[in-house]
Amino acid sequence: MNKNQPNNQENHEIDLLDISKNIGKLFDRINIFLFNCIQFFVKKAIVILILLVIGVGLGFYLDETKKTYDHQIIVTPNFGSTDYLYSKIDLIESKIKEGDTVFIKDVLGIKKPKELVKIEIKPINDVYKFIENKTENFELIKLMAGDGDIKKILEDNLTSKNYKFHKISFQTKNMTTDKLSVQPLFHFLNESAYYSKVQKEIINNVQLKMVQNDTIIAQINAVLSGFSNTVKGGKANNLVYYNENTQLNDIIKTKESLINEQGFLRVDLIGLNSIVKENSSILNIENTNSVNGKLKLVLPFLFIFIFILIRFFIAFYRKQALKANMNG
């Protein structure tokens, strides 16, 4: 045992010595690499400076001339036209991808079809509006949530398409106006013979409902007026009779309910003037995603990187060619 211990200790010292030498060599290589990099940039300083100037200048030019703009429109599809609306937007997007400028200009009505880059539509997740005054929708969500994650249910395509509000987003190469883009788009979306007929009938039904409600409210007012005159006439004994037999509270609640319904119907009529109702729009938001607006920073480094790759390839090729000649 004692004879082996000195040998093990000696081997251990040799291993440590080798490791320290390798670490020293590694640092030497790093130093050489850093020196070569510095030397390369010093030797090629003029070329690199020229590439920087060209990259920055070209980047500024492209950032100013090649801007893209995002536009957002909040809409409400009426009369059960949600699927119709989505299919129309999908049709426009497919024509953009195909480069069908004839369709975009003549059918859609965009005078500068090549400036339209893309268009899409997504539902605005608003579960509160979805279940507002609609008990059946609330019960449906509870039933569906019983079998899975409530968040997934609310974002599911079948559920989200039934939300009241949806957002149309489109992108153009230059700034646009309501007249140039939004108006032609909504003219195209609202051009449907079927939904126009549905619109006409639903508006007639709403107006008829409002007339009937006004008639019922007038009748209730007459009943209440008669009761008021009776009380004022001093027939106090009839007061107990009215309280117990005419269900006066129910009549008053019915009137209140009808007045509230009239208010909702008047608001609904405002939104029923279009198949796809435009609620609000925001135009000309400069797109800064990806490298948009950042080319003045990206291009200089890109040019220098390409230059370094080319120089590295040339040096590698010459070195390998020299080795091949020596071996040959």
Image (spheres, helix red, strand yellow):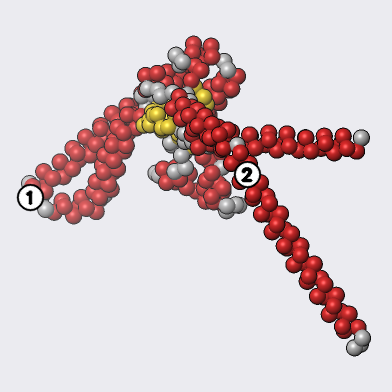
For label 1, the residue is 234
Instruction: Identify the image quadrant of residue 261.
Output: top left
Q: Position of residue 328 (x, y in %)?
A: 92, 35
Instruction: Identify the image quadrant of residue 318.
Output: top right
Tag 2's secondary structure?
helix
Relative placement, left or right, of 231 versus 151 is left
Question: What amino acid is at disc 1?
Answer: Gly
For label 2, the residue is 39
Tag 1's secondary structure?
loop
Marks 1/2: CA–CA distance: 113 Å
Residue at (50, 32) in percent of width and height:
53
Number of numbered discs overlaid on the protein picture:
2
**Which quarter of the rendered picture does the N terminus lie within?**
bottom right
Q: Position of residue 2 (x, y in %)?
A: 90, 88
**On screen, residue 300 above or below 233:** above
109, 246: nearer the viewer: 109
Question: What amino acid is at disc 2?
Answer: Gln
Relative placement, left or right, of 12 versus 44 is right
- How would you rate the neighbour count of disc 1 (Cα within 10 Å): few for under 14, some for 14-19, many for 20 or more? few
Residue at (23, 39) in percent of width and height:
220
